[in-house]
Image (cartoon, rainbow, N blue to C red):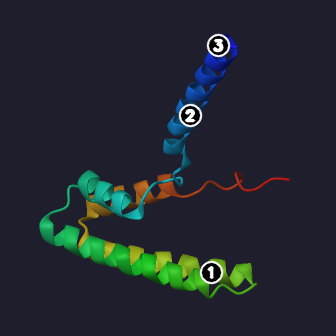
Amino acid sequence: MKKVIGLCLVLLISSVSVFAQDGKRRTKKGGDPAQRCEKMITDLKLNEKQAVDFRKVEAEFRDKMKAERKQADSDRRKMREKMITMRNERDAEMKKILTEDQYKQYLEKQRSQSPRKGHGRKG
């Protein structure tokens, strides 16, 4: 009887530790938008004024995207076109803030973060 109770106790403890470790992997792909923004600021080596303007443009873009997603109608093509237009507007604002080299780096990082075509839902 003591062996059975001991075995159950060991299994219980090991299963709890397995579930505790799994929690770290449940974050969204790409992480927190604010963290991505700060990483981009660091990677691009922005000065204070650029960093403030960069954060402002990114925050406005996120707010607009949230609003658009809430208003999303059934026409996915129209929604996609709006999103592309909004991204282009954001990029135009970023071009005003960043130097030419920073802007090139910014675009490269944006492309590397965007989802790849062909990797969508299958089935």
- Say which element carries label 3: helix
State the residue in front, 34 or 17: 17
| For marks 1 and 3 on the same chain, the one whose residue lies earlier in the sequence | 3
Q: Position of residue 110 (x, y in %)?
A: 45, 59
Taking the image as shown, residue 60 lies to the left or right of residue 120, namely: left
Picture quarter with the N terminus: top right
On screen, 109 above or below 23?
A: below
Label 2 to label 3: alpha-carbon separation: 21 Å
Which residue was labeled with disc 3?
Answer: 2
On screen, 56 above or below 6?
A: below
Q: Amino acid at mark 1?
A: Glu
Quadrant of the rendered image containing residue 92: bottom left
| For marks 2 and 1 on the same chain, the one whose residue lies earlier in the sequence | 2
> Badges 1 and 3: C-beta atoms under 8 Å apart?
no
Q: Residue furthest top?
A: 3
Which residue was labeled with disc 1?
Answer: 81
Residue at point 52% right, 85% down?
A: 67
2 or 1: mark nearer the eye = 2
| For marks 2 and 3 on the same chain, the one whose residue lies earlier in the sequence | 3
Residue at point 45% right, 54% down?
A: 31
Q: Position of residue 41 (x, y in %)?
A: 26, 59
Neighbor class of circle 1 (other Cα within 10 Å; few <14, some 14-19, many 20+) is few
> Badges 2 and 3: C-beta atoms under 8 Å apart?
no
Taking the image as shown, residue 82 lies to the left or right of residue 41, namely: right
On screen, 41 above or below 18?
A: below
